[in-house]
Image: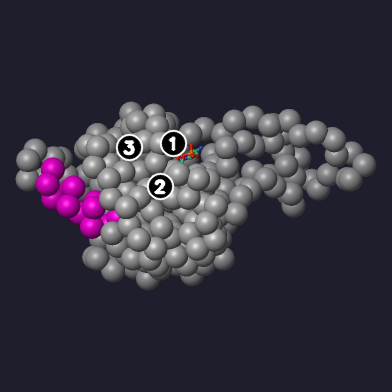
Amino acid sequence: MHLLVTAGPTREHLDPVRFLSNRSTGKMGFALAAAAAEAGHAVTLVAGPVALDTPPGTTRVDVVSARDMLAAVQDWLPAADVLIMSAAVADWRPRRCAGIKLKKASMPATLELEPNPDILKTVAPLKGERLFVGFAAETGDPAPEARRKLAAKGLDLIVANDVSQTDAGFAVDTNRVVLIAADGTSQALPLMSKLDVARAIMRWCEERISYSAGTSTRQETGRSSPGAFR
Ligand code: C5P
């Protein structure tokens, strides 16, 4: 399989040194890329700004903003069998980005924002036979909101986690997730390392791909380089 994995936060600049972002460190997405590579799959890892080493055997594409990430996903999707969107994409960006550092005195007291594109929704028409996997980070019971996002974004699987817990979610090496599939099945995993969570997600993808390969005339994408899907 060829997996396209996004990881980390995005940064939405208001000038060259200031930006809006979030607490994502990219650990879950990098663990997914590492688990996929260790299982022998081809991996393209689209990474927002993070302080992590590139997992061996993966191709890394660095991006900054949500719009950069969308462009990279559109470039690489034709080559992919599976898209895993684990990035914490910033929902909003400043309406204007200054080319030079804004002087304190000239900064507005309020920021005008505009919405970023939803990457999963934007590429949904290009899904074809590919598997699309999303993440839902919620505070409190993540399942109801995750089910809503699974349907709204047309996903095959959503990985739901409660980010209000100190041992799961942002910036830690462990996670406690529930895998919720579009066919109605769900699997609550115990607290485990992000690498083991990633391996469980990989197994789900492998089983689903081999099942559909056996039951349909699935077209091979047969490509390993970016194509034009924009
Ligand atoms: O709507 P929410 O941000 O909670 O959805 C989370 C899922 O959607 C994640 O898989 C995330 O990577 C993806 N997402 C996206 N484009 C956005 C925001 C989130 O693809 N602009």
Marks 3 and 2, the one that precedes in the sequence: 3
Q: Which residue is mark 1?
A: 145
Tell me where residue 26 appears, x and y as whole percent: 50, 58
Structural distance between the alpha carbons of marks 2 and 1: 9 Å
Q: Which residues are magenta?
A: 201-212
Is 177 placed above or below 116 here? below
Residue at 20% x, 54% y is 206
Q: Amino acid at mark 1?
A: Glu
Residue 205 seen: yes
Residue at 24% x, 37% y is 184
Few, some or many residues within 10 Å of mark 1 (<14, 14–19, 20+): few
Tell me where residue 87 appears, x and y as whole percent: 48, 49
Marks 3 and 1, the one that precedes in the sequence: 1
Structural distance between the alpha carbons of marks 3 and 2: 13 Å
Q: Which residue is mark 3?
A: 155
Q: Nearer the viewer, mark 3 or mark 2?
A: 2
Tell me where residue 91 appears, x and y as whole percent: 57, 37
Residue 84 seen: no
Q: Amino acid at mark 3?
A: Leu
| Left or right: 161, with 132 as reference point | right
| Left or right: 95, with 228 as reference point | right
- Quadrant location of residue 174? bottom left
Q: Nearer the viewer, mark 3 or mark 1?
A: 1
Quarter holding the C terminus is top left
Q: Nearer the viewer, residue 67 or 193?
A: 193
Q: Are marks 3 and 2 in contact (CB under 8 Å)?
A: no
